[in-house]
């Protein structure tokens, strides 16, 4: 990981901490401490004053996801620092994306036991991207390849952030405001699918750029 990226990550973390402090102070002074003190979700009713804390919560989730991805990428780059070829994997690994359908089990677990974590499995749809990565196994990582990789990741992240913005906007406009549990389910499904889309597009777009399609 470059020093510039480390510095930017730290700066974003500090900025997020400042936003959290501001949000807590705002909530205590102007919103009766909602989302600061313990909140009974079964009795929760959305009001517009909750938007700052909800937005900060969403930004925190985004930063955590970004941090995990950054650490994972740094670990992979360190491991492959001496390699000039892409890793060897089978395109058949892309079938792991089928596990994404397990996310639909969340509707059953929620109806039966109010459990929503299975919706996270929707993120496994991103594993379909391994099919395209497998088709590029043992590819020389020359300058053109690295340029195409950065271009693919940039476009994938752009699409992900655009969808994430729409998701946050819908929640901020009061979607499911009377049913906070459904709001949580919507956010969990949306973030999982967006994460899957970013993973898939990163591999798919790189494959397209490399093949000139």
Image: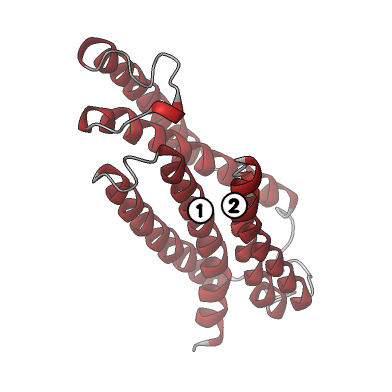
Residue sitting at x 50%, y 80%: 209
Q: Residues within 10 Å of mark 2 (few under 14, many from 20)?
A: many
Given residues 34 and 157, the one toward you in this image is 34
Given residues 96 and 186, the one toward you in this image is 186
**Residue 89 at x, y = what percent?**
78, 70
Residue 43 is labelled as none
**Residue 101 against residue 140 in the figure, above or below:** above
**Residue 101 at x, y = what percent?**
65, 65
**Residue 126 against residue 212 in the figure, above or below:** above
Q: What's the CA distance linking mark 1 and mark 2? A: 6 Å
Give residue 51's quadrant in the image.
top left
Residue 56 left/right relative to 9: left
Q: Which residue is mark 2?
A: 119
**Residue 51 against residue 103 in the figure, above or below:** above
Given residues 28 and 1, the one toward you in this image is 28
Residue 91 left/right relative to 187: right
Q: Earlier in the sequence, mark 1 or mark 2?
A: 2
Q: Is residue 4 visible?
A: no
Q: Secondary structure at mark 1?
A: helix
Labelled pair 1, 2 in contact (Cβ < 8 Å): yes
Q: Which residue is mark 1?
A: 189
Q: Which quadrant holds the N terminus?
A: top right
Give residue 151's quadrant in the image.
bottom left
**Residue 184 at x, y = what percent?**
46, 42
| Snapshot colouring | secondary structure
Residue sitting at x 68%, y 60%: 102
Q: What residue occupies the far front of the structure in this picture?
A: 112
Q: What residue occupies the far top of the structure in this picture?
A: 29
């Amino acid at each position: 990981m470059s020093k510039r990226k480390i510095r930017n990550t730290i700066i974003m973390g500090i900025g997020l901490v400042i936003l959290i402090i501001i949000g807590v102070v705002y909530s205590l002074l102007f919103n009766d401490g909602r989302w600061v003190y313990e909140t009974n979700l079964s009795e929760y009713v959305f009001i517009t004053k909750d938007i700052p804390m909800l937005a900060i919560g969403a930004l925190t989730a985004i930063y955590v996801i970004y941090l995990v991805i950054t650490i994972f990428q740094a670990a992979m780059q360190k491991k492959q620092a001496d390699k000039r070829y892409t890793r060897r994997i089978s395109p058949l690994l892309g079938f792991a994306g089928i596990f994404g359908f397990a996310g639909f089990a969340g509707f059953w677990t929620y109806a039966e036991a109010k459990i929503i974590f299975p919706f996270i499995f929707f993120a496994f749809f991103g594993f379909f991207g391994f099919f395209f990565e497998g088709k590029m196994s043992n590819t020389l990582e020359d300058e053109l390849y690295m340029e195409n990789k950065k271009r693919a990741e940039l476009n994938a992240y752009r699409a992900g952030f655009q969808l994430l913005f729409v998701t946050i906007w819908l929640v901020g406009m009061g979607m499911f405001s009377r049913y906070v549990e459904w709001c949580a389910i919507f956010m969990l499904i949306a973030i999982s699918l967006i994460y899957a889309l970013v993973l898939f597009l990163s591999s798919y777009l790189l494959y397209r750029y490399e093949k000139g399609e």
